Image (cartoon, rainbow, N blue to C red):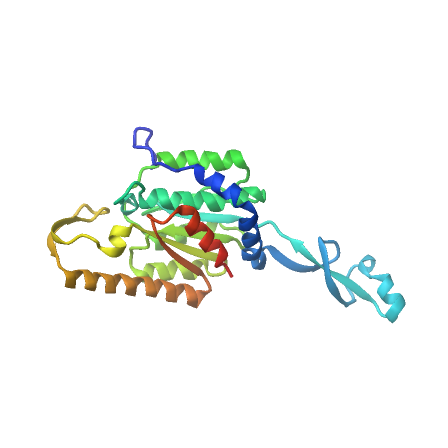
Amino acid sequence: MQKDDHKRHNIDLDFFRQLDRFSFMVKKKVSTAYAGSRRSIQSGRGLETIGYRQYYPGDEFKSIDWNVYARLEKYYIRKFEEEKSLTTHILLDTSKSMDYRSNTISKFEYGAMLATAFAYLVTKDNDKFAISPFSEDIITRKPNRGQKYLFNNIDLLTKIELAGKTDIEKSVASYEKAIKSRSVVIIISDFLTDYKEIESAVFRLSKHDLILVQVLDKEEAELSFQGNIKLEDAETGDELNTYISESFKEEYQDMLSEHVNKIKGICHRFGADFYSFTSDTPVFDSFFYAISRRK
């Protein structure tokens, strides 16, 4: 799927410097966003005492708080809030439709920057992540940690060839076998595919902390052109000569809104988060919005 002689994609690393400048705000939002997945209530040793509960047979005897016993003459043990390591799996659409651009940045480059932004924050916490490209199939990459692994991923993304159609149902069915424990799963795509396939993918991953990020080009989101025009399907190469009228544009907008609303409904039903951005929006703004809206 990768070719050294293929054009290199522009993944702007200045974005990392933006993340560092806003690191306090981002970390505050991230700590809240990931709290539900990263924390569990346990007895015994931990990071912070959050309360007490009565001792039950089978609990460690050494965990009894004797100061409480001296006051109440009953056995109580402390409860702690303990951080757990959490793996982040990022599935990035590399189908041919992601190569579309009406300005300086393609949908893929925009999505790749969002993917590396999530990976960058995971790296800051020294947790594991994987960025796995998919189209008709998926390249399953083993999660790892560290800056060296992050920049290795970025280098691979700059060289990757965008080809084929989006088969999210098949790709997720294959990838879910590689997820060994409850994780954060982020899917970045234009999601311009049958919503039934998206529904199947979301259902399969619904036991995880799931995020869907849609990336569209402003031109395809708003259909800003009109008149006689030749349209080409980026994934199949099929061409269509047509006339874009105002009524056609209205019908197109209605169909796109209906499709996006169906995806939102699927995500709501299965407890996943959904965000939709156009590639003319500053990447940091989109990323920070997604983080700040996390439950």
The answer to which image quadrant residue 237 occupies is top left
Left/right of residue 79 with respect to residue 139 in the rendered view: right
The relative height of residue 130 versus residue 211 in the rendered view (above or below) is above
Residue reaching furthest to the top? 5
Residue 36 appears in the figure: yes
> Percent from the top left, x then y, of residue 252?
21, 61
The residue sitting at 58% across, 42% down in the picture is 126
> Percent from the top left, x then y, of residue 163?
28, 42
> Percent from the top left, x then y, of residue 248?
16, 61
User: Quarter holding the N terminus?
Assistant: top left
The residue sitting at 24% across, 47% down in the picture is 235
- Please state the total of marks drawn on the protein image: 0
Residue reaching furthest to the front? 21
Residue 143 appears in the figure: no
Left/right of residue 66 with respect to residue 18 in the rendered view: right
The answer to which image quadrant residue 259 occupies is bottom left
The residue sitting at 37% across, 35% down in the picture is 158
Between 202 and 70, the one nearer to me in the picture: 70
Left/right of residue 33 with respect to residue 153 in the rendered view: right
> Percent from the top left, x then y, of residue 37?
56, 57
The answer to which image quadrant residue 272 occupies is bottom left
